[in-house]
Amino acid sequence: MQQDNPYYALIMAGGEGTRFAPLSTPSRPKQFLNLLDQKQSLLQQTYVRLLDSVPQKNILIATNQRYIPLVQEQLPDLIPAQIFGETRKKNTAPCLAWICFQLFQKNKNAIVAACPADHFITPLPLFTETLKETFHMAERHNTIVTIGIRPTFSSTQFGYIRTDAAPGLPRPLRGLAMTVQNFVEKPDAATAQKYFEDKNYYWNSGMFIFPVQKMMECIAEFLPEMFSLLQKKPTLEAFFEEVQSISIDYGVMEKTKGLMMLEAPFTWSDVGTWENLRKLVEEHGIELSAEVIPLLQK
């Protein structure tokens, strides 16, 4: 009997993209715009990027309920059961907890890659190789794995990950497996410069890969009220009405011991500002859509 593929991807697509106003609006935010491609939105690019690592039927979307029609419009191959729409904006931990709890009922052996919907990543083969390795690491060591970005400049825009090399662990052809010492919030300019000079600090990409059972254990330990609410098996609306608003970084990642990190061998950007986008265009020769060009030239 053939077993189901245990690898899943959860695309986090609920943000409002306010830093890309006026193009990004509350009704059609950044992840649904063709910012980096003339034909595909950031969400569509993320979806396509994951298809080399995860079966199409195992790709899930976490978004705001009002954006479900946009997701269905841009990713018509998905069925409704693959799209989760939070009814209230409560940051990343509640939506991830809700989806992991539902998935845990279906497949207790699932390994999940949670990825933001609005990143620039190239080249694709290196990303695919890295993601597959993180799946194997998470499964082999029963831990949460993140992908760290080697800083290319001193930045106050990102959270950081402090690491130490983990000797003896299997290492991929590219990248470096490390243990995570701790997560650090966005620093001031002087601290960011120190982190840049200290080679043990990486930018936090916001990508996390984990066994769903491990994540549920962490939520039970560090967010017991949230876990208790899940155990009551409320409706999605009732859960988001009552649950606390907290990020998965604050709620789980900063408190969990034994996390691992793989250094990204690919080029990455969170496309966080117009200036970031301008830099990507200059460095990678991206052909922008007609609606983006005049705004970028301002």
Image (cartoon, helix red, strand yellow):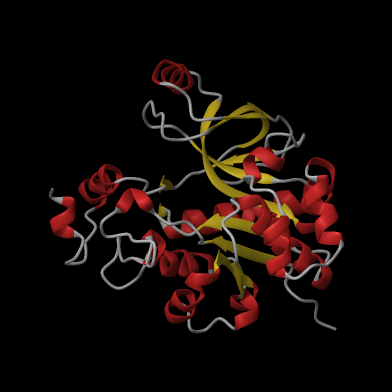
Q: Is 298 positioned to the left or the right of 95 in the image?
A: left
Residue 54 picture location, percent across and down: 61, 69
Residue 185 picture location, percent across and down: 54, 30
For the residue pair 71 and 261, the one nearer the viewer reads as: 71
Q: Quadrant of residue 246?
A: top right
Residue 280 picture location, percent across and down: 28, 48
Q: Quadrant of residue 261?
A: top right
Q: Is 155 positioned to the left or the right of 56 in the image?
A: left
Q: Is residue 246 above or below residue 15?
A: above
Residue at point 42% right, 53% down? Answer: 121
For the residue pair 166 and 150, the one nearer the viewer reads as: 150
For the residue pair 95 and 157, the one nearer the viewer reads as: 95
Q: Is 258 positioned to the left or the right of 96 in the image?
A: right
Q: Quadrant of the N terminus?
A: bottom right
Residue at point 68% right, 55% down? Answer: 94
Q: Is residue 19 above or below residue 149?
A: below
Report whether residue 110 is seen. Answer: yes
Residue at point 50% right, 71% down? Answer: 66
Report whether residue 122 is seen. Answer: no
Q: Is residue 74 above or below residue 180?
A: below
Q: Quadrant of residue 212?
A: bottom right
Residue 134 picture location, percent across and down: 65, 51
Q: Is 14 positioned to the left or the right of 223 in the image?
A: left
Residue at point 55% right, 46% down? Answer: 206
